[in-house]
Image (cartoon, grey):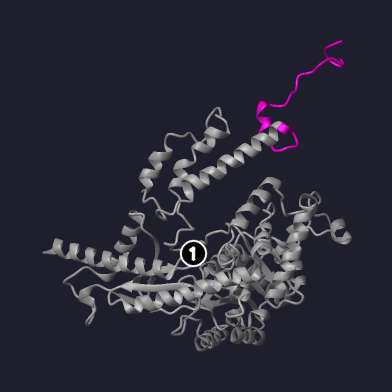
Amino acid sequence: MNGVGGVGERRDPRPDAAKWFLSGNDGDRARYRDAIRRARDLVLDEFADEATPYSGATPEELDDALARFEMLPHEGDGVAAALDRTEPILRNSVGVSDPTCVAHLQCPPTIPALAAEVLLTATNQSMDSWDQSPAATQLERRFVDELCDLFGYEDGDGVFTSGGTQSNFVGLLLARNRVVLEEYGVDVQQAGLPLEARDLRILCSADAHFTATQAASHLGLGENAVVTVPTDDDRRLSIEAFDEAVADLRERGKRPFAIVATAGTTDFGSIDPLGPLAERAVELDCWYHVDAAWGGALALSDDHADKLAGIEAADSVAVDFHKLFYQPISCGAVLVRDASVYDLIDRNAAYLNPERDDDAGVPNLVSKSAQTTRRFDALKPFVTMQALGREGLASMVEYTVDLADDGARLVEADPDLRLVHESELNVVVFRYVPDHERDGGASADGPSADDLNEAIRDSLLDDGEAVVARTTVDGETCLKLTLLNPRTTREDLRDLLREISTRGTALETTTDDRHE
């Protein structure tokens, strides 16, 4: 008998599109295998080509290439057609593994980490509650424990983040909550900021990452709560200027409550005096946060770990794995010296991490994170470490730091170029100097050095020859090579610097001719 309540054959109510999920079904497995193979081949055929680090396509050309695709088509054409439509995207992506892609803190990812991405995206673990990510939670906790050991945190704890921005925010969030609770008796989570919080101040280097100021804004303190301290001749926070800034704040009735030191400033790779700042944090009863998003990888190296001396005294540390740990974006962590400080941001939700889980010792990581849903990013550095070991990663860090030293010497040997800063990490900041400015300053007879340096950088990108960074130092436009890639050689640098000099001379001559 058919009909309602009958036992006869019934139509499968699932939509046809339900076949596009991975399961134990042979057809689903075959579709997954084919999709991954096609994606792999596209990467190898369209992206992993070292002819140039960039195609040179303009924003308008990229818009034209993508205009033929609807972003929200009414009907789909299947995975093969969909992946084929990614070809113009892959062809016009920056080749981060190219030896002349040397602009930003954007590392080439290791092959083990790329393989780990396949695993973590397929399993799709969400790291907020243990019942969504049991093995993943345990692995992240173990990885964090060993990271704490690496940075000298015997009783530390931590959690993975999307990167330095979020890690710096969490460090300052904990700092704000602690000082408001201890000094004003106010639980910020429940009551918000008291009026006295208007006097709270954060101190950091004038060359610190902008996320310290951004965090102050997000935390309701306002950007004016951040006091930037001048740097010394090595572009490190000046301790003398720091002491003067503190004296001025106290005289005006302001309360310094957090110090942000930087282990690897974005432009210069400078490392602030971590030990002396740790001492001042104790004297001033300040939270001490170290932004080691870039320089934290030095802890892996026996040759360079001493540059981080004093970091073990910090209350919190930001470290990025998608920089010198060679992981795909995004992958970072924030570590704390005292695990109990997470009580300052803890909260419970009955559907996610009920209090009974806390009583039972169930590790729901959402209580330590600024995120709820969060990727299982710890799998990437885990697989990389298992494949290469600390020694393998340390060798790449050491090579690139030495490479930057070689780059600085090459700049100094070129009469067209001027070295602007000698870095502690793997960056070279320099400037093309036009002929009419080399012997006694600027002249109105030729193009400005600022314009020429901008034009050199733009022409290299437009021609797909190299991806070089630009920045401003003491009001002057400079070029910057950020040398994270262990496949870049001294010869690559020599050729690039020669090309920069050649283009600068050509642009200078062309501009002069136009003015005659």
Toward the viewer: 182 or 242? 242
Q: Is residue 347 visible?
A: no
Toward the viewer: 329 or 116? 116
Q: Is residue 12 left or right of residue 371?
A: right
Above or below — where is 83 with respect to 258? above
Q: Amino acid at mark 1?
A: Arg
Residue 448: percent from left, percent from top? 24, 69
Residue 204: percent from left, percent from top? 54, 77
Residue 304: percent from left, percent from top? 57, 79
Above or below — where is 131 with respect to 468? above
Q: Residue at x 69, y 74 (%)?
A: 150
Q: Residue at x 50, y 67 (%)?
A: 484
Q: Quadrant of residue 310?
A: bottom right
Q: Which residues are magenta?
A: 1-26
Residue 452: percent from left, percent from top? 27, 66
Could you tell me which quadrant the N terminus lies in?
top right
In magenta stretch: residue 86: no
In magenta stretch: residue 18: yes
Disc 1 target residue: 487
Q: Please, what is the dominant secondary structure of the magenta stretch?
A: loop
